[in-house]
Image: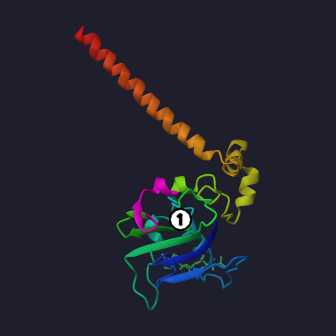
């Protein structure tokens, strides 16, 4: 699996639609200060479901929508797509190309799409779980992240190893199963209460 292409429209400094094709090998993005290099990494974090404006270097999520410049009016929505080559089926979807899209309007509502089909944020999170690509993954190492990892508590550092070992999805399924079990126990107790009232 590899990232083939990023399409950005209306996100931060990108008022016009830009398509970035990433060829196999190493790609370096260079440019003067403030030209939008970090905004590209922010766009990838965002499309993967980032919910924290702070992580995206803003104060409100709406700050990610292009807010206008000297010669340009603000735009009403932002859209970012990541196109991944999945010929090796590393992602659990039977497609050799996967397009993940997030769209956000000024109202703050986000929409997510997988191969142009509307989906939930959870579907995107589950798709990338244990691949290292997700928002909690280790594929984007931002400035200061290594220092933070070294000074993190061991429990937090362990999360990175769990993602690499591929057990995050099982932990997440266990939490879901425990919630369902708890709900079922409560339902059973209610049934028993009703039965004892009827007797
Ligand atoms: P450096 O090399 O200094 O780290 P950079 O190339 O990584 O810079 P970024 O931090 O990606 O630059 O981009 C910062 C630019 O993005 C600033 O000029 C800022 O005004 C612009 N910007 C951020 N959010 C928005 C927005 N919502 N609308 C318009 N422009 C924005």
Question: Which quadrant is home to the C terminus?
Answer: top left
Q: Secondary structure at mark 1?
A: loop
Disc 1 C-beta below 8 A from ligand 1: no
Q: On the image, which quarter does residue 142 sit in?
A: bottom right
Residues 28 and 35: in front is 28
The verdict on residue 78 being magenta is no
The furthest residue to the top:
199
Q: On the image, which quarter does residue 86 sit in?
A: bottom right
| Quarter, ligand 1 | bottom right
Q: Position of residue 189 (x, y in %)?
A: 37, 19
Instruction: Name above or below for residue 155 compared with residue 25.
Output: above
The verdict on residue 121 being magenta is yes
**Residue underneath mark 1:** 95
Residue plotted at (74% across, 51% down): 151
Residue plotted at (44% across, 33% down): 180
The magenta region covers 113-124
Q: Residues within 10 Å of mark 1 (few under 14, many from 20)?
A: some
Instruction: Name above or below for residue 161 compared with residue 66.
Output: above
Q: Position of residue 143 (x, y in %)?
A: 69, 66
Q: Position of residue 29 (x, y in %)?
A: 67, 80
């Amino acid at each position: 699996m590899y990232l083939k292409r990023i399409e950005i429209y209306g996100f931060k400094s990108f008022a016009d639609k830009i398509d970035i094709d990433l060829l196999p090998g190493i790609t370096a993005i260079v440019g003067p200060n403030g030209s939008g290099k970090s905004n590209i990494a922010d766009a990838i974090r965002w499309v993967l479901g980032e919910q924290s404006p702070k992580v995206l270097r803003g104060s409100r999520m709406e700050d990610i929508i292009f807010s206008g410049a000297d010669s340009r009016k603000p735009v009403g929505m932002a859209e970012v797509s990541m196109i991944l080559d999945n010929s090796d089926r590393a992602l659990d979807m039977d497609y050799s190309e996967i397009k993940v899209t997030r769209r956000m309007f000024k109202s703050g509502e986000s929409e997510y799409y997988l191969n142009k089909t509307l989906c939930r944020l959870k579907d995107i999170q589950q798709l990338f779980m244990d691949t290292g690509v997700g928002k909690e993954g280790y594929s984007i190492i931002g400035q200061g992240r290594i220092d933070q990892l070294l000074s993190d508590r061991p429990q937090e550092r362990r999360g990175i190893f769990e993602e690499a070992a591929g057990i995050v999805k099982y932990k997440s399924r266990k939490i879901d199963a425990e919630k369902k079990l708890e709900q079922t126990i409560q339902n059973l107790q209610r049934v028993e209460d009703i039965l004892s009232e009827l007797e």
